[in-house]
Image (cartoon, rainbow, N blue to C red):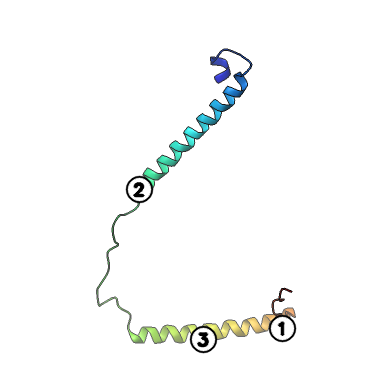
Amino acid sequence: RYLGSHPPGPRAQTVAAIHGYTVAFSVACGLFLAGAVITAVLLRSGRLPTNNSEDDAPTDEDDSVDVAALQRRVAELESENRYLQEVLHIRTVAAPTPS
């Protein structure tokens, strides 16, 4: 576009390249500015509301049930891991030390 609208000369190609870079930089700045504005509009400002309700607080019973369930699941996964290591003949090897 630049070469068609400006008179030809020995430096026309260089000036056209500089013009292209300037246009590309301007477009990139515009996109960055649009992204910044969209981000500023979409993000909430200030602190998030806190829920101080006593009804939603977990009880000790809930915690003990969760811990017991997690311990059972860990034991299941460990036994499955041992089984797979035996079936696949995988040996656990310590990482080599750099010398």
Image height of 64 relative to 33, above or below: below
Q: Quadrant of residue 55?
A: bottom left
Q: Looking at the rendered structure, which numbered label has been put on residue 8?
A: none
Q: Say which of 53 and 50 sits in front.
A: 50
Label 3 vs label 1: CA separation?
Answer: 21 Å
Given contact means CB atoms under 8 Å apart, are the residues at marks 2 and 1 in contact? no
Q: Residues within 10 Å of mark 2 (few under 14, many from 20)?
A: few
Amino acid type of the residue that numbered disc 1 sits on in the rendered structure:
Glu
Look at the numbered disc 1 and give the secondary structure of its residue. Answer: helix
Amino acid type of the residue that numbered disc 3 sits on in the rendered structure:
Arg
Q: Which residue is mark 2?
A: 40
Q: Can I make out residue 1 in this image?
A: no
Rendered residue at 24%/74% (across/down): 53
x and y percent of residue 79 in the render? 61, 85
Look at the numbered disc 3 and give the secondary structure of its residue. Answer: helix
**In this rendering, the label closer to the viewer, 2 or 1:** 2
Rendered residue at 53%/15% (across/down): 5
Q: If the image is split into quadrants, where does the C terminus sit?
A: bottom right
x and y percent of residue 11 in the render? 61, 19
Q: Which residue is mark 1?
A: 86
x and y percent of residue 93 in the render? 71, 80
Look at the numbered disc 2 and give the secondary structure of its residue. Answer: helix
- Earlier sequence position, callout 2 versus callout 1: 2
Asked if residue 67 lies left or right of residue 89, the reply is left
Q: Which residue is mark 3?
A: 72
